[in-house]
Image (tube, rainbow, N blue to C red):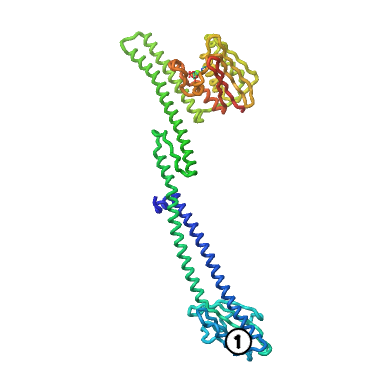
């Protein structure tokens, strides 16, 4: 990943490098700028100290009891050695006269100094003076009263210190700052790129591993080895997601296999029936029988497809629930009456126990279908002499409907799967033409649609209880 392509694609790497380099450079710039300001102020302060001390010395001479005017001439040319020359002008009453450093630069005419007229006695007033030759001076004006021996009156002292060297040093320092900031920028971009490249290497590796995972390689996982914590968390979540996908994909595949298998058997039977009927000539009764058997298979297929469609719609939340206030006892009595004969034929007792005023907010048709599936199962799996009990009562959360039988029970290893589509227990039952293995799946879908839950309590040989918990409206 090149830096340029990163900028084009607004990549994370480019953003990180830009922010890192920007922050580092800004920090260097700020530090250097503050140091530069401190240096400028320090230099100016030192110059002012020099000027103040010299001005105070001259002022003391002027205020001395006996003013030595010749010495003043000596004073004004005292500091002409070296690069930091100090120019001075003393202007006082007649007894003192005017004393000026010889060859005073042209830029230091009296009116370039701070105006003495506005100053109080012994006040210092500083200023900056630039002359036409590019020299720069720090200047001060001081007004003081001469001693009585010098006739009193005000004396103006003007001093200017050549600070051109200071400016040169500062200019050099400023150049250095520009260089340091440029170097910091280049270095931080380089370091930023290096950090990002090394750190994002694991992200690249992870993305390559993710690319490898497809529908046929859902058993692969992203390796967590060497990943930084943050990426490790993402990879762990991703692996969990693939595990869920793998299981969902697996059950989808099994489901598709089951549907194909379940459809194939009745279709084969229909085909066989038709082939047999067409082979040679048949009597009208034989044809009628063949057609009736074909119709029977078609009904079986049609009810299976309807059931599958219903479950699919319920799972997608597209099945409609027509809520109404049901009298639970009435509905359960209808179911009891419906199964009365088949229970009697199987030699199984069927009883109902329910508060006659118990009511529930649910879809009446779906409610009956859910409970009927349970009752049908219980009758089918309870041997002669056994009993199936239908019971409903209110509980804390709503209404619970139990279907309990004293039948064969469900093996523990099957209990987890009884709600799966097409699950029919042992192999013998799988060949039972009338059983599809969708009853409990439909019942569970109905309960889920009502936001309730289904519970199973069964011990092999001792009987089974299915409980439907419907929440209060
Ligand atoms: N009360 C019960 N006692 C013992 N086994 C049961 C009972 N209810 C369900 N089962 C087991 O659970 C399996 C699934 O039941 P389910 O109602 O879903 O399918 P089915 O009865 O086989 O077929 P279908 O209801 O679609 O006609 C049954 O085949 C049976 O093995
Ligand atoms: Mg059933």
Q: Quadrant of residue 265?
A: top left
Which quadrant does the C terminus fall into? Answer: top right
Q: Position of residue 222 (x, y in %)?
A: 43, 39
Q: Position of residue 315 (x, y in %)?
A: 50, 29
Q: Is residue 198 visible?
A: yes
> Which residue sits at x=40%, y=42%?
208
- Choose between 421 and 205: the one closer to the eye: 205
Q: Quadrant of residue 142?
A: bottom right
Q: Residues within 10 Å of mark 1 (few under 14, many from 20)?
A: some
Q: Position of residue 113 (x, y in %)?
A: 57, 81
> Which residue sits at x=30%, y=10%?
280
Residue behind label 1 places its C-beta within 8 angstroms of ligand 1: no
Q: Residue furthest bottom?
A: 94
> Which residue sits at x=65%, y=18%?
355
Q: Position of residue 179 (x, y in %)?
A: 45, 65
Give the total number of marks visible in the rendering. Answer: 1
Q: Residue furthest left?
A: 280
Is residue 276 found left or right of 225 in the rendered image?
A: left
Up the image or down, 22 lies above or below 97; here it is above
Up the image or down, 294 lies above or below 149; here it is above
Q: Is residue 432 visible?
A: no
Q: Say which residue label 1 marks.
A: 91
Up the image or down, 441 lies above or below 222; here it is above
Is residue 157 found left or right of 278 in the rendered image?
A: right
- Choose between 441 and 472: the one closer to the eye: 441
- Choose between 142 and 301: the one closer to the eye: 142
Q: Secondary structure at mark 1?
A: strand
């Amino acid at each position: 990943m090149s830096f340029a392509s990163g900028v084009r694609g607004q990549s994370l790497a480019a953003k990180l490098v830009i922010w890192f380099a920007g922050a580092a450079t800004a920090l260097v710039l700020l530090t250097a700028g503050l140091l530069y300001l401190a240096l400028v102020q320090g230099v100016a302060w030192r110059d002012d100290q020099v000027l103040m001390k010299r001005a105070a010395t001259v002022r003391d001479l002027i205020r001395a009891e006996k003013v030595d005017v010749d010495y003043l001439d000596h004073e004004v040319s005292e500091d002409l050695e070296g690069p930091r020359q100090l120019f001075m002008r003393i202007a006082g009453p007649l007894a003192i006269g005017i004393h000026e450093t010889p060859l005073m630069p042209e830029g230091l005419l009296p009116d370039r100094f701070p105006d003495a007229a506005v100053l109080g006695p012994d006040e210092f007033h500083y200023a900056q003076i630039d002359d036409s030759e590019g020299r720069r001076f720090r200047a001060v004006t001081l007004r003081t009263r001469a001693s009585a021996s010098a006739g009193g009156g005000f004396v103006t002292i003007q001093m200017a210190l050549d600070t051109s060297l200071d400016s040169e040093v500062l200019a050099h320092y400023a150049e250095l700052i520009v260089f340091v900031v440029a170097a910091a920028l280049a270095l931080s971009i380089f370091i930023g790129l290096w950090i990002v490249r090394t750190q994002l290497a694991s992200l690249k590796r992870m993305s390559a591993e993710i690319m490898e995972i497809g529908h046929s390689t859902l058993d692969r996982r992203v390796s967590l080895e060497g990943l930084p914590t943050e990426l490790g968390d993402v990879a762990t979540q991703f692996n969990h997601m693939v595990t869920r996908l793998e299981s969902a994909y697996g059950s989808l595949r099994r489901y598709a296999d089951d549907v194909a298998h379940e459809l194939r058997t009745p279709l084969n039977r229909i085909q066989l029936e038709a082939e047999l009927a067409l082979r040679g000539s048949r009597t009208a009764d034989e044809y009628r029988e063949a057609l009736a058997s074909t119709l029977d298979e078609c009904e079986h297929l049609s009810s299976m497809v309807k059931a599958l469609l219903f479950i699919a719609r319920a799972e997608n939340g597209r099945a409609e629930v027509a809520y109404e206030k049901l009298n639970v006892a009435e509905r359960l009595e209808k179911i009891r009456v419906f199964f009365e004969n088949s229970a009697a034929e199987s030699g199984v007792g069927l009883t109902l126990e329910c508060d006659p005023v118990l009511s529930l907010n649910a879809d009446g048709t779906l409610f009956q279908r859910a409970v009927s599936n349970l009752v049908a199962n219980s009758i089918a799996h309870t041997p002669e002499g056994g009993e199936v009990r239908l019971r409903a009562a209110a509980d804390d959360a709503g209404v619970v409907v139990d279907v309990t039988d004293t039948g064969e029970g469900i093996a523990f290893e099957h209990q987890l799967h009884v709600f799966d589509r097409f699950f029919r227990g042992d192999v013998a039952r799988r060949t039972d033409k009338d059983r599809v293995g969708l009853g409990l799946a439909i019942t569970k879908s109905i309960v889920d649609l009502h936001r309730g839950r289904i519970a199973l309590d069964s011990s092999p040989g001792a009987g089974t209880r299915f409980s439907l918990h419907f929440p209060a409206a």
